[in-house]
Image (cartoon, grey):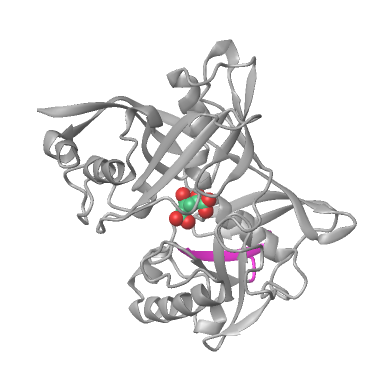
Amino acid sequence: MQTAIPCLFMRGGTSRGPFFKASDLPADTAARDKLLLAVMGSPDRRQIDGLGGAHPLTSKVGIVSRGSQPGVDLDFLFAQLQPDKDTVDTTPNCGNMLAAVVPFALETGLARPQGATTTLRVLTLNTDMQCDITVQTPDGHVAYEGDARIDGVPGTSAPIKIAFLDTAGSVAPGLLPTGNVRDVIDGIDVTCIDNGMPLVIFKAGDVARTGYESVAELNADTDLKARIERLRIACGHAMKLGDVTAKNYPKMTLIAAPRGGASICTRSFIPHVCHDAIGVLAAVTVATACVLDGSVTRGIAVVPDGYVKTVSVEHPTGEFSVELELDPDNPQFVTRAALLRTARLLMRGEAMVPASVLSYNE
Ligand code: NQM
């Protein structure tokens, strides 16, 4: 006998995974995590006995419920699993999976459409962070088809706009958790910053790389990975995140001068595998570093003038545009970050969980 758990399988931005109503999962965290590991087929490099896609970007789970606070429509809990580990990390947010939250809520009756578009306020429980998400809902249904293109996903889809309301210090204590816009840590010039995702940003040239290498080249570069991991552990302490050896953050971002009209070129380690594109909140955080005087991006980033600006973050499969609004009285302070994503319902059904997985915790 297996237990059937109602589930929608969804793409959110450049990530993908099963979405559940919180009320369909065990309330106990240990029992829930055991169930999620079984659903995804972790730990196993191939995740052959589960729904995971054998990559960190396809080892993600979304858990959604009605908002628990005044003014909040929906609560979102994001869970990051790893193919080959038995961890379920609900500490950082995922701005890609976030894009599928409102479509999921409309599909499952957790929320009702408002008209041609529907805007709902979503609280990410991982980071206690709110955002307004707008989806297309002509005729009272979520539209998935449209003209919006995001790099890293083939074709076009209906646009989903995410406007973040409060991103600074999502996991780390503050936007600049070391207290500085720039530090030298383990011999490397870094900016440690968290505007939605804790990141360590450093010049690719400082680790003897160009920053234009392919994802395959970087993933095969074991010397570089070892160097980056050593830096990551040191920065974790400096960012007051403690021992990050077993944690999925901070993510490590190599930067280089932009090509083809972007503002900056990036290669992101999340944190041990090189991202095919870049995470949503990672892109917001890199864009924020680009507007901070004295950060490691200075002399490399090409940023437009004005208090409302689009910062184009180049990544291995294209670019990611982030709209930033700066406080005119303090242009070092980002008041709002907005961006475009797409999402799609891929499959509707039930995730089957072996009885032994559930009975273990009874
Ligand atoms: O930074 C990858 C992704 C992410 C997270 C990661 C994300 C974000 O691309 O907001 O979206 O950094 O693990 O889904």
> Quadrant where the C terminus lies?
top left
Does any portion of residue 262 appear in the rendered image? Answer: no
Judging depth in this view, the residue of 32 and 256 nearest the camera is 32
Q: Position of residue 53 (x, y in %)?
A: 29, 46
Give the residue at x 50% y 44%: 96
Residue 131, compared with residue 250, is above or below; it is above
Total marks in image: 0
Judging depth in this view, the residue of 357 and 327 nearest the camera is 357
Residue 267 is left or right of residue 72, and the answer is: left
Q: Which residues are magenta?
A: 257-269
Q: Residue furthest left?
A: 1
Residue 282, compared with residue 25, is above or below; it is below
Residue 326, compared with residue 182, is above or below; it is above
Q: Residue furthest front?
A: 362
Q: Position of residue 136 (x, y in %)?
A: 59, 23
Does any portion of residue 95 appear in the rendered image? Answer: yes
Q: Is residue 346 magenta?
A: no
Residue 255 is left or right of residue 328, and the answer is: left
Give the residue at x 40% y 64%: 247
> Quadrant where the N terminus lies?
top left
Residue 59, compared with residue 18, is above or below; it is below
Q: Is residue 265 magenta?
A: yes
Residue 329 is left or right of residue 78, and the answer is: right
